[in-house]
Amino acid sequence: MNRRISLARQLSLAMAALAVSTVLVSTAAFNIVYGVLEQLHVVAPLPPGVADTTGVDVGIVLAVCVMVLAFALAIALRLARRIVRPLDAVGAAARRIARGDLAARVAPTEEVHGETALLVSDFNAMADRLQRMADGVATWNAQIAHELRTPLTVLKGRLQGAKDGVFPLDAALVDGLLGQVDGLARLVEDLRSVSLADSGRLELILADVDLEAELAEMAPMLRSMLEPAGFTLRMDLRPSRVRADAARVKQAVLALVDNASRHADPCELVIAVHLTGSEVVLSVADAGPGLPSALEDDAFRLFVHGERVGARSSEGSGLGLAIVRGIARAHGGDVRYRRGPDRFAFVVTIPRG
């Protein structure tokens, strides 16, 4: 409240001082100019014995000063209220947010105009973003706990069973445990990649690479991933030199292929790369069933699982497409979903330079 009184008082005093000063300066200037004109004989001098200024003149000047002062104070107080009221509302909302109430907002009113209205709008936009970030953190933590629970439960159960003699501690059990540990390691690395990408700190080791050659090297490994699930692989690769992080691009391709092997019907999977203008276009296409239109954008969010998009498998972590988008954007490009008459593809674009 002291801030409000101080601001309103300062504004009122400033306007009052300006108004009174204007009257006094105008009066003094009139007398000075009249005196100069007398000296130059432009106007006739006053007769001897007649005073330049009378008591009536002084009274008129004082009356005008009082009237101007009252008018200036009234205008200043009204203006101060219009300025300070939204500032008080912003301050109150900021204090509520500081106490943890992220739903606090400033209600715009008809009195708010110009820069003050812009301040209120910017504050509400900032509060909206803070609330979305807080909700995202809560969702992130809950989903991480959910993703970690299953492999940790399996590990604990197998180890406890081995300790109690239920499971023989043989090579098969150890291989199974190592598989669970590998899954945990991949999940942690995926989480790290997404976190770095979201914060704009995903490290890229850029070099001039030919994606045609890089992807051709991946063909045997990709076929070994796809054939057990009933897929065949066709690669439509054209010379595509680009400045990129080859390892990260391969990581994105692996994520897209893994996504297709989990959620698409067995078909011929086509990986293509070519140049178009100033971009390299990389796509992974399958025969569907594809994403529902309403979920095409949501597919790139964190922890969107197959069961949410009509998939036949839900074993993924829901991080793959988020990682692809993070890698593409770290290169200055992006990823989108493209729907065709008989093909559905995820398309990654990367600037050549």
Image (cartoon, helix red, strand yellow):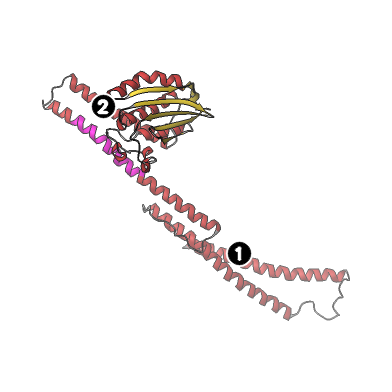
Q: Position of residue 155 (x, y in %)?
A: 21, 29
Q: Is residue 133 above or below residue 249?
A: below
Amino acid type at circle 1 is Ala
Which residue in the structure is indicated by mark 2? 181
Q: Is residue 94 above or below residue 31?
A: above
How many residues crowd mark 1 within 10 Å: few (<14), some (14–19), many (20+)? some
Amino acid type at circle 2 is Val
Q: Which mark identifies residue 14? A: 1
**Range covered by the magenta-colored residues:** 136-156
Badge 1 marks a residue whose secondary structure is helix
Q: Do callouts 2 and 1 mark residues in contact (Cβ within 8 Å)? A: no
Apparent side of residue 120 relative to residue 140 in the rendered image (left or right): right
The quadrant holding residue 69 is bottom right
Q: Which mark identifies residue 261? A: none
Q: Nearer the viewer, residue 51 or 162?
A: 162
Front disc: 2 or 1: 2
Apparent side of residue 228 relative to residue 42 in the rendered image (left or right): left
The quadrant holding residue 341 is top left
Q: Nearer the viewer, residue 280 or 106?
A: 280
Q: Position of residue 49 (x, y in %)?
A: 84, 81
